[in-house]
Every structure is written in structure tokens, then in C-alpha cells.
Image (tube, rainbow, N blue to C red):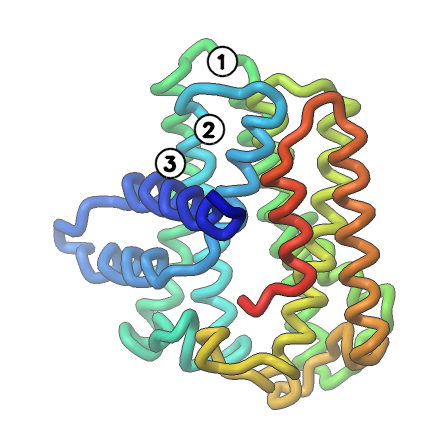
């Protein structure tokens, strides 16, 4: 099989794992559960759970203990998207080619849907103990999940982004890098680090993986900024030009289109170089990182 076929296979497998951990659509609270399913099942690249599983495999991991963490991280990612789309944030009406959660279920229920996904993510991750009760690596993986999603990770980046936007202030490059490293990079770091930790990688190798993931996260967000200018709504599944509409500072705003594209390439190559320096190799993982350079989605 070629890379695209293998990727589709791995995305499908990740999709099945993520959806298998969603709560049953029943009970008096069924509407919010329905909205959780709607948000998570809207599609997407499933990039983070795929990264997690590939790094887990890279370091010799085997078994199902990784699966609750794959699902949990995707729930956290989707909660952030539900909240990002709200009128108080980016005010987007489309996500992955479908109406956003707040458009379908209302703003109040969308807020609760994001809250529910975040809380249920940790309920899900804790199910790793049901699979391997004596696994000493699970607590460290849980710590990474909490920290990378929190104040010093994704949430911290979102807070700076919202504050600057509300004040109508342009960010400088240091501030924008802070936002990119946390708002986007932190969950990719989380995915790869948890994969490495649960597989038993050394502290040094976990550190190398974290640095590579940081580079990938920033490159991924820069590419997102590029696509917001040059992309096609039918291909992307969301409106283009929303950054300009919301007067947001982007990497393209500060560096220009050509330099932004060069930086995506350079960061991706540095990340691949780190992975190629590890004792074990995963060529699919290297190719997946490279594919971010020219992605359309």
C-alpha cells in the first residue's frame, strides 16, 4: 500500500477507537451526549491519536493501554474546537463541512458539550487502569494529558489569543509563537509524549520527542494560517479568511507568505531529523510529518 492508503487505514482505526469510548446516547442528559457525538463524529484528520499510536509503536509499545488515551486526547481536541467556534470566540458556522455545534444545538448546549468532552476525556483516560491496573507509567501519562491541556499548555495559549483579540492588539512574534506552541503544539506534544511514555521510552528520548512535537505543532499551525489565506472552503470544510475577518494576528501577517512556507518546511525537516536520530525508526511517522508541509487539510 502507498502512504495515502496506509494513512486512511490508520485514521479509520483511530476513528473506531475514539468513537468506541464515547458515552451511550441515553438518559435525561441525552441532548448533551448527542452533541458530543455530533462534534466528535464530524470527521477530521485524527492526527493526534494517530501520532500517539505511531510513537507508541516506535518505542516498542504493544497492547490496548494506549487506546483510552487516544480517545481522551481526541475528546480534548474536539472540546477546544467546539468552544473555539462559539460566537464569543471565533464565531464560525462551519467545521469540517458541517454546521458547528452551537449552530445546531445552541450556544448554551455547545458550552456544556465542550465541558462534557473535557471532563469525559479524563474519565476515559482513567480506564487505562482497568486494562493494566499495575502499569506504573499510566500516572505519568495522565500528568502529561492534564498539563498539556491546561494553563501551561493549550488553555494558556487560547487565553493569550482571546485576550489580544478582545483588546484589538496585534501580537508580536514572541507572543504569537507562545500561542502557537501551546494552542496547537501542546496537544501534539501530549500525543507523542504519552505514546513514548506508555511504551517505556527513556526520559532523554521523551524529551527529544517533545521537542520534535513542538516543531511539528508550530509548523502545523503556520500551515493552518497559510490555508486560511490560500485554501478552499470545500476542501477545508470550514470558511477561509476567518482570521482576517476576526482581525487576528497570524504567522502570515508577521512573516509574509513566502517566509511562512519556508519556515513550515524547515521546522518539519528539523522534527524529522530528531526522529531519525532515535534508535528505532518508523518510516510512516516520518512520512506523515513530511506530508504536513504540503497538506490541504
Q: Nearer the viewer, residue 196 or 106?
A: 196
Q: For the residue carrying disc 1, how many other residues have a C-alpha within 10 Å: few (<14), some (14-19), or many (20+)?
A: few
Q: Residue furthest top?
A: 134
Q: Position of residue 230 (x, y in %)?
A: 64, 82
In the picture of the structure, the residue carrying the numbered disc 2 is 66
Tag count in the figure? Answer: 3
Say which label, 1 or 2, has the lower sequence index: 2
Q: CA distance from mark 1 to mark 2?
A: 12 Å
Q: Position of residue 90 (x, y in %)?
A: 54, 78
Q: Nearer the viewer, residue 164 or 185?
A: 185
Can residue 273 be seen at all in this image of the molecule?
A: yes
Q: Residue at x 63, y 55 (%)?
A: 291
Res. 10 image quadrant? top left
In the picture of the structure, the residue carrying the numbered disc 3 is 124
In the picture of the structure, the residue carrying the numbered disc 1 is 135
Q: For the residue carrying disc 3, how many other residues have a C-alpha within 10 Å: few (<14), some (14-19), or many (20+)?
A: many
- For residue 221, the mark is none
Q: Position of residue 13 (x, y in %)?
A: 37, 41
Amino acid at each position: 500500500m502507498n502512504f495515502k492508503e496506509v494513512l486512511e487505514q490508520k485514521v479509520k482505526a483511530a476513528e473506531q477507537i475514539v468513537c468506541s469510548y464515547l458515552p451511550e446516547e441515553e438518559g435525561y442528559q441525552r441532548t448533551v451526549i448527542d452533541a458530543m457525538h455530533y462534534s466528535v463524529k464530524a470527521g477530521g484528520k485524527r492526527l493526534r491519536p494517530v501520532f500517539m499510536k505511531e510513537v507508541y509503536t516506535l518505542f516498542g509499545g504493544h497492547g490496548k493501554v494506549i487506546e483510552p488515551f487516544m480517545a481522551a486526547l481526541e475528546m480534548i481536541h474536539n472540546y477546544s474546537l467546539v468552544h473555539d467556534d462559539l460566537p464569543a470566540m471565533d464565531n464560525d458556522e462551519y467545521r469540517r463541512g458541517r454546521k458547528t455545534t452551537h449552530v445546531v444545538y445552541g450556544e448554551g448546549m455547545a458550552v456544556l458539550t465542550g465541558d462534557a468532552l473535557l471532563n469525559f476525556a479524563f474519565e476515559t483516560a482513567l480506564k487505562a487502569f482497568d486494562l493494566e491496573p499495575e502499569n506504573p507509567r499510566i500516572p505519568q501519562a495522565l500528568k502529561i494529558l492534564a498539563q498539556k491541556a491546561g494553563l501551561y499548555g493549550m488553555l494558556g495559549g487560547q487565553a493569550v489569543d482571546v485576550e489580544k483579540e478582545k483588546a484589538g492588539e496585534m501580537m508580536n512574534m514572541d507572543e504569537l509563537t507562545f500561542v502557537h506552541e501551546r494552542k496547537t503544539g501542546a496537544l501534539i506534544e501530549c500525543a507523542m509524549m504519552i505514546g513514548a511514555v506508555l511504551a517505556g521510552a527513556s526520559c532523554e528520548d521523551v524529551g527529544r520527542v517533545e521537542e520534535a512535537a513542538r516543531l511539528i505543532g508550530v509548523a502545523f499551525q503556520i500551515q493552518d494560517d497559510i490555508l486560511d489565506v490560500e485554501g478552499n472552503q470545500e476542501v477545508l470544510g470550514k470558511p477561509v479568511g476567518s482570521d482576517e475577518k476576526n482581525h487576528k494576528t497570524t504567522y502570515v501577517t508577521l512573516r509574509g507568505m513566502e517566509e511562512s512556507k519556508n519556515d513550515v518546511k524547515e521546522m518539519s525537516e528539523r522534527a524529522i531529523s530528531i526522529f531519525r536520530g532515535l534508535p528505532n525508526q518508523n518510516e510512516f511517522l516520518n512520512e506523515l510529518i513530511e506530508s504536513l508541509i504540503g497538506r490541504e487539510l
